[in-house]
Image (spheres, rainbow, N blue to C red):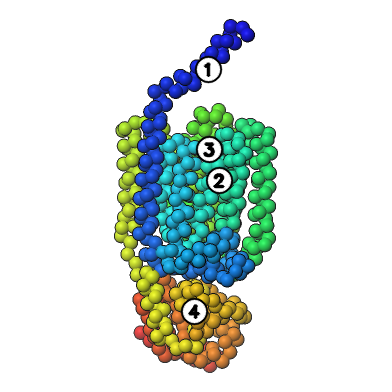
């Protein structure tokens, strides 16, 4: 061995010692401890806030739907229920076993809160891999205190479970890109598969991270073995998506339910869009989404995301020297919004002020974290203080004020009062007409763990035997979507003689201005109101409908509710 080789070997053996003795190492360790304490404190505060809200509201109609599917007597019935409710089966299977432990409102919502904790932890870990620990704290604060994240953590839904799998998959995929360890790729694939079995929004998430990972493959930074393994995983996930589409989703496409849901989603936008161009519609819905998750001026939030995308572009190139990786980092923020806008344009999936847009929130958190990177990439009291002040202002202005000032009449006590009123007002054996949303509520608060007998009728009507009552639901999920007067022939055909006999009509108002009797009864056939009872905005009417052909000379008579 020559002298140069000996010197090189000596330098290589001495290098670790120099790293251990470096003052930067000790400083980084101390910062890491502080950061983890901040992570713990942020998540604890978020859990405390959510815990206090678990039993604030009564079980909503979507939550009651999950309860109905989960209470089925066996796994086969649970799987069948998931097909009816256009959701993949995993969350229903979980709640099927969770119900063994209890069925109170707060207890049914507890899993969402529990799933939220690892979602936040893995969200921080992914952002930490992407940008470093201090900028990742900004993203963690956003994820912890964004109102949709708080709300979805206290409802009987599968969104926090889905997000837990999302962030876990992102973290393990990032580790795979760095270390090219196949175990992390397998872990990422398992998380993505479970997410797909939790909610179908995962399909768009898979599309985004698949396109981003393709750029990483094109960068030449992965070995052939890693690329081959990644390709095998992609085909496996595509196979899962195709299987779920053919077995389940295909029946929902172009159905009446899809049309109704699109009407609701489009009407929830902040601006009338009848004459707007597709690009303008996409921008409006993107702004609605930013206001939904961030609460402040969507233009300001959009600018922050663009800054974050530019920062990721520069950082990606500086760290790797690869233009492909730099573009991939930049598109982590931009590409999901572009895909969401295209999905909206082709009416494949909603974007805007709706929980269905929550699949975008990991990438939004990355954008906000990256926007804070110039201030937090290195320790500094002044820069850190400025960032803490801005983040604290956002928390105070948006989530703190909203949660603090939350007042509602839509409580579990109200729901039980309505059911008590129904039992005391409507005689056993009576026929009750209602909509799908109210029927879901009655399934939980009237029937509970008991099982209802369902029979599909013509024209989209459905009949249920709920306890001592015969309940018939109209073809629409909400009464305000139902043109009752125009559908009289179907109604009379289904009910026969009962259509013009005294019957009960019941609905939950959900504190919606669309559910006032004055507005709803404009859509109803001529009628006589024989009896009326209500608790807050929840109504029970005993009606006798008059066939339109038997009353051609009169419009609706003045009724108790019209006065």
* Residue 321 position in % (x across, y down): 55, 28
Judge depth for marks 3 and 1 and give the one in front: 1
Q: Residue placed at 53% from the left, 38% from the top?
A: 329
Label 4, label 2: how far apart the Cα atoms are: 43 Å
| Disc 4 + disc 2, Cβ < 8 Å | no
Residue lying at the far front of the rendered structure: 101
- Compared with 23, 366 (above or below) is below
Secondary structure category for the residue under label 1: helix
User: Residue 381, image x and y in percent?
Assistant: 31, 32
Q: Nearer the viewer, residue 507 or 561?
A: 507
Instruction: Decide if residue 463 is on the left or right side of residue 40.
Output: right
Residue at numbered disc 3: 329
Residue picked out by circle 1: 13
**Residue 9, relative to residue 488: is it above or below?**
above
Question: What distance separates the C-alpha of mark 1 from that of mark 2?
Answer: 37 Å
Q: Nearer the viewer, residue 155 or 255?
A: 155
Q: Look at discs 3 and 2 and give the one toward the viewer.
A: 2
The residue tagged 4 is 434
């Amino acid at each position: 061995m020559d002298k140069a080789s000996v010197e090189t070997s000596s330098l290589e053996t001495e290098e670790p010692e120099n790293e251990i003795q470096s003052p930067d190492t000790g400083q980084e360790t101390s910062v890491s401890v502080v950061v983890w304490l901040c992570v713990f404190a942020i998540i604890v505060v978020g859990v405390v806030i959510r815990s206090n809200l678990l039993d604030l509201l009564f079980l909503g109609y979507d939550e009651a739907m999950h309860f109905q599917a989960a209470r089925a007597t066996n796994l086969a019935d649970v799987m069948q229920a998931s097909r009816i409710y256009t959701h993949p089966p995993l969350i229903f299977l979980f709640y099927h076993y969770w119900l063994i432990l209890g069925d109170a409102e707060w207890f049914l919502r507890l899993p969402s809160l529990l799933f939220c904790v690892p979602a936040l932890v893995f969200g921080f870990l992914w952002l930490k891999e992407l940008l470093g620990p201090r900028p990742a704290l900004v993203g963690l604060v956003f994820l912890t205190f964004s109102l949709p994240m708080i709300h979805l953590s206290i409802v009987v839904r599968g969104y926090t479970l889905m997000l837990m799998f999302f962030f876990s998959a992102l973290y393990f995929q990032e580790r795979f890109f760095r270390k090219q360890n196949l175990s992390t790729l397998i872990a990422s694939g398992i998380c993505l598969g479970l997410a797909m079995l939790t909610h179908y929004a995962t399909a768009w998430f898979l599309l985004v991270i698949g396109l981003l990972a393709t750029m990483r493959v094109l960068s030449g930074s992965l070995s052939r073995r890693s690329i081959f393994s990644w390709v095998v995983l992609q085909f496996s996930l595509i196979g899962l998506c195709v299987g779920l589409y053919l077995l389940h989703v295909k029946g929902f496409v172009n159905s009446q339910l899809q049309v109704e849901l699109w009407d609701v989603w489009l009407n929830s936008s902040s601006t009338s869009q009848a004459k707007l161009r597709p690009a303008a519609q996409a921008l409006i819905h993107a702004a609605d989404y930013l206001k939904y998750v961030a609460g402040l001026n969507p233009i300001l939030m959009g600018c922050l995301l663009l800054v974050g995308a530019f920062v990721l572009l520069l950082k990606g190139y500086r760290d790797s020297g690869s233009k492909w990786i730099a573009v991939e980092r930049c598109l982590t923020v931009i590409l999901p919004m572009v895909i969401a806008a295209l999905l909206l344009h082709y009416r494949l999936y909603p974007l805007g002020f709706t929980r269905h847009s929550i699949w975008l929130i990991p990438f939004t958190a990355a954008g906000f974290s990256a926007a804070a990177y110039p201030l937090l990439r290195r320790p500094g009291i002044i820069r850190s203080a400025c960032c803490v002040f801005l983040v604290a202002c956002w928390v105070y202005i948006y989530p703190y004020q909203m949660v603090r000032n939350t007042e509602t009449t839509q409580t579990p006590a109200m729901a039980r009062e309505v059911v008590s009123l129904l039992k005391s007002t409507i005689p056993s054996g009576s026929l009750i007409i209602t909509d799908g949303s109210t029927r879901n509520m009655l399934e939980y608060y009237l029937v509970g763990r008991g099982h209802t007998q369902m029979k599909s009728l013509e024209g989209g009507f459905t009949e249920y035997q709920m306890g001592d009552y015969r309940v018939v639901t109209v073809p629409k999920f909400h009464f305000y979507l139902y043109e009752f007067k125009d559908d009289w022939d179907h109604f009379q055909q289904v009910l026969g003689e009962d259509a013009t006999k005294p019957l009960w009509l019941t609905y939950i108002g959900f504190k919606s201005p669309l559910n006032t009797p004055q507005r709803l009864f404009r859509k109803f056939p001529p009628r006589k109101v024989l009896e009326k009872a209500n608790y807050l905005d929840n109504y029970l009417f005993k009606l006798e409908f008059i066939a339109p052909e038997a009353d051609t000379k009169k419009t609706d008579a003045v009724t108790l509710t019209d006065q």
